[in-house]
Image (tube, helix red, strand yellow):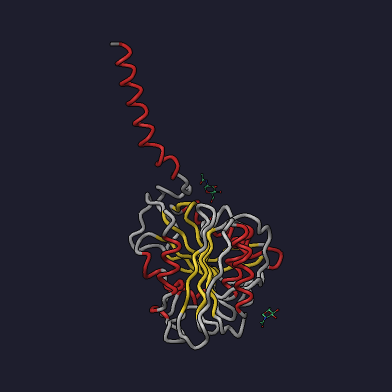
Amino acid sequence: MASLQSLRWLFGLLAALCLLAPVLAEANVTAGCGKTPTLTSGQRTLTVNGKSRQWIIRLPSNYDKSKPHRLIFGLHWRDADFKSVDTGSAPYYGLRALAGDSTIFIAPNGLNKGWANSGGEDVTLIDTILQTVSEDLCIDQNLIFSVGFSYGAAMSYSLACSRPKVFRAVAVLSGALLSGCSGGTEPVAYYCQHGVRDSVLNISNGKQLRDNMLKRNGCQAKTAQEPARNSKTHIKTEYSCNPGYPVTFVAFDEDHVALPKDSGGDGGANSWTIPEVWKFFSQFT
Ligand SMILES: *[C@@H]1O[C@H](CO)[C@@H](O)[C@H](O)[C@H]1NC(C)=O
Ligand SMILES: *[C@@H]1O[C@H](CO)[C@@H](O)[C@H](O)[C@H]1NC(C)=O
């Protein structure tokens, strides 16, 4: 009788642990969870290495302080600024329209309309913004992402190099090695796309970054097909990599365009890129 009782007790304990385990495994949230936030949507300023730096934050309209949110950085291209990412026909590279109330978006501003990241100062900017929002907002620390085009793609790649534990995945749209790569040995889930007719940063640049990530993420070799010129299409290659570190590469028949469409030119909010990047980011939960 006694042993039956203790067996029952043991089963009860095991069941409780099984129910609790996923909760414990997922509990990696910021100190801001449960706090009434002081940050609201809009433009902010902070000081990094003695320089005044600007950024824009967008909270979901129904921000819930007890719900851990995804966080996506949208980094601007060269000769643009943070407002270019925050406004226009497809804010935050079109992702904001798909995110509902799940996600907080941040557009930091580069210096001199770019991301030279001299001495790592732009990485420090991202670190400082993350510290600031973590204390105030409820963020799932396993769901932090960065997306950018051109110079903003280069900076997203740089973040994957120097902050591989912080960023769950990055999306590099027509990127090149322009913002440095400090570290650059650890895996990070990686989406990238590049135009086969890119006349600003040719496609070799994008493939160079991709090939580095394929090594880091332990991916199997695979030949990525590219669309013929004037075929007006795109071809996606998904690599088989170490669990949790997928790599996707899309080659498209266009020039240096952030949000291409298959009929040619800039697709804006109708670009196939938007659902592709969203699908890549939102596979992580
Ligand atoms: C929690 O998040 C931090 C910061 O992003 C990361 O360094 C750490 O590895 C995460 N821990 C777990 C258990 O996922
Ligand atoms: C592509 O760009 C890189 C970097 O600017 C350059 O070294 C390379 O020669 C270019 N390749 C082609 C095929 O134009």
Q: Position of residue 23 (x, y in %)?
A: 40, 41
Marks counted in the figure total: 0
Instruction: Give the quarter the ligand 2 occupies.
Output: bottom right
Q: Is residue 130 visible?
A: no
Query: For this rendering, which residue is in front, 48 or 12?
Result: 12
Residue located farthest toward the bottom when viewing the structure as drawn: 230
Q: Quadrant of residue 18?
A: top left
Q: Is residue 53 above or below residue 28?
A: below
Q: Position of residue 19 (x, y in %)?
A: 35, 36
Q: Is residue 12 left or right of residue 175?
A: left
Q: Is residue 38 above or below residue 84?
A: above
Query: For this rendering, which residue is in front, 43 or 251?
Result: 251
Q: Is residue 101 left or right of residue 202?
A: left
Q: Is residue 271 visible?
A: yes
Q: Position of residue 81 (x, y in %)?
A: 55, 76
Residue at horizontal 37 percent and vertical 70 percent from the top: 97
Q: Quadrant of residue 53?
A: bottom right
Residue located farthest toward the right when viewing the structure as drawn: 119
Q: Is residue 236 above or below residue 6?
A: below
Q: Quadrant of residue 280?
A: bottom left
Quadrant where the N terminus sits is top left
Q: Position of residue 248 (x, y in %)?
A: 51, 66
Q: Is residue 220 left or right of residue 140?
A: right
Residue located farthest toward the top when viewing the structure as drawn: 1
Query: For this rendering, which residue is in front, 206 or 236?
Result: 236
